[in-house]
Structures are given as structure tokens and as C-alpha cells.
Amino acid sequence: MEIIGFILSILIGISLGLIGSGGSILTIPILVYVFQVSPSDATTYSLFVVGVSALAGSINGAKHKLLDYKTALYFGVPSVISVFLMRKLVVPLLPNTLLTISNFTLTTDLLIMLVFSVLMILASFSMIQKRKMTENDSSEINHNNLILKGVFVGLLTGFVGVGGGFLIIPALLFTAKLPMKKAVATSLIIIVFNSLLGFLGSISSTTINWGFLLFFTAFSVVGIFIGQYLSKKIANEKLKPIFGWFVLFTGIYIILRELFNQTLC
């Protein structure tokens, strides 16, 4: 089963390399359901895996001068601050049991998986839709809107351990008015800082199995180079809907599984 998990971890990098998002969407289910990592710890592990993988991917964007550093600062700084504060100050204070109603108990781990699965479903819709994502007109960029979206993505990243690429890329396209290739490359560098600083904020409250984490991450990094190679051969517009349907069914499966397990407790 572990061999399957490490093979699947390559898909994390391939997803980031091909479409600039989807890494964490795959990371947490693999960690939780294949390697039996608790959801709380999986969010921490996911931040490291996605952060390092995105770092490897962003090097290619830097080489081809696709990074928009000004936009990365406007979006990234408030996002990084939000994710660090969430991981350092909020998440460690959450009790194991949040709510009990009759026979139903809402735990922090259950809430994480439910929120995560809803995000998977929302992300899948943006992947399945046929509309072509192109930059907006040349009207003035709303920097305040960009900052607010950065804060929102940071809070989300901090709570459920997602890189947030499926939210970052549309914001860069339609709010920052970046072309698609620049949006993907810039999103990777934002994901790097969000994820790795979020991870640093969690180290003190999480026991890390470094051997496993580094091995898992190595497979993901291999995947991102495969993804970047494939992106030159295959149009991501063709792959996104297929990946979107997979994400949709996985999100629905997680909701049903978690709620079914809860009813059995």
C-alpha cells in the first residue's frame, strides 16, 4: 500500500507542473487514507510537500522570466502573514472536539476533512468548466482587492493545508491581469512562501517523521519536472477537465466516507 502511496505522490508534482495547482488536493487524501496520517498532521505535512514541490517548479518560471514580483508581493505578503498566524496561533488552540449534538460529534479532524472536501469540489468546477481563462482588459489593477484575496487564501492555507493554487491563479488572471503563463509561474512562488512559512508555524505543535516526509516529497519533486516536461507536449486545457472530474468524485467520496464513519462511532 505504501508503494502505491509513493507512486501517487508523483501525481502531486505532475499536477503542479502541468496546471500550477491541485498539489495539495492530492496530498492530503494520500497522506490520510494511504499512509494513515491524522488529518491535523496531514495538513502540516502537506504544506511542506507542496511548498518544496512548488519551489522546484518556480525555478523554471524564474529562468524564463515569467515571475511577476510586484504582484507576488501584493498578494503574497498578506497571504503569508495570514497563513503563519493561522498555523502558529489559531490551529494549535483548536480542541479535539468542537461540537456534540446527540450522537454526532464534530472533531477538528472531521471539520478539516469536510472543509477540504468542499474545497476540492469547488476547485473541480473551475477545472471542468470549458471557459478559457485569459487575462482581463487593461483596466486599472485593484490592489486592495488583491490584498484581500491574499488574506483569504492565507487563512485557507493555514487551516486545511492547501497551497491554494486553484484560488490564486484566477485572482492573478482577473484581478492582477496577468497572462496565463505568468499567473501559473507567479502562483508557484506564492505557494512556496505560503506553504513553507505555514509549515514553520506548525513545527512546534506537530511531531514530524522527517525520513518519511523527505522521501514522500522527493517523489513529488520528481513529478513536478515530469509535469513541466509534459506541459510542453500536452495542452493543459485538455487535461484540466479530466483531472477536475477526478477531484470532484474524490471530494464527494471524502464527505461520504467521513460522515459514514462518524455515524458508526
Image: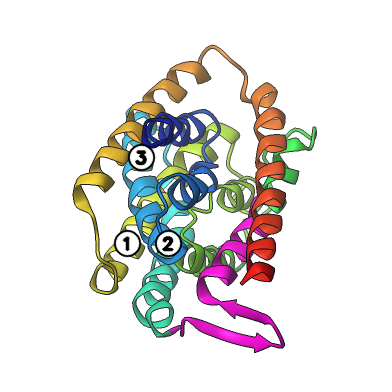
Who's the residue at 23% across and 54% down the image?
209
Give 254 or 125, whichever is nearer the viewer: 254
From the image, tell me which residue sits under label 2.
Answer: 38
* Image spot of residue 13 (x, y percent): 43, 33
Residue 199 tag number: 1
Residue closest to the far right:
130
Dot 2: within a 10 Å radius of its alpha carbon, few (fewer than 14), some, or many (20 or more) residues? few
Identity of the amino acid at label 1? Phe
Give 228 or 6, whichever is nearer the viewer: 6
Identity of the amino acid at label 2? Ser
Could you tell me which secondary element the residue under label 1 belongs to? Answer: helix
From the image, tell me which residue sits under label 3.
Answer: 53
Q: Quick check: 153 left or right of 73?
A: right
Location of residue 256 by image quarter: bottom right
Q: How far is the residue under mark 2 from the one under mark 3?
A: 22 Å
Dot 1: within a 10 Å radius of its alpha carbon, few (fewer than 14), some, or many (20 or more) residues? many
Looking at the rendered image, the disc whose residue lies closer to the viewer, 2 or 3, is 2
Residue closest to the far front:
264
Give 186 or 26, whichever is nearer the viewer: 26
Who's the residue at 36% across and 71% down the image?
84
Is 97 magenta? The answer is: yes
Q: Which residues are magenta?
A: 94-120
Cβ–Cβ below 8 Å for labels 2 and 3? Answer: no
Could you tell me which secondary element the residue under label 2 belongs to? Answer: loop
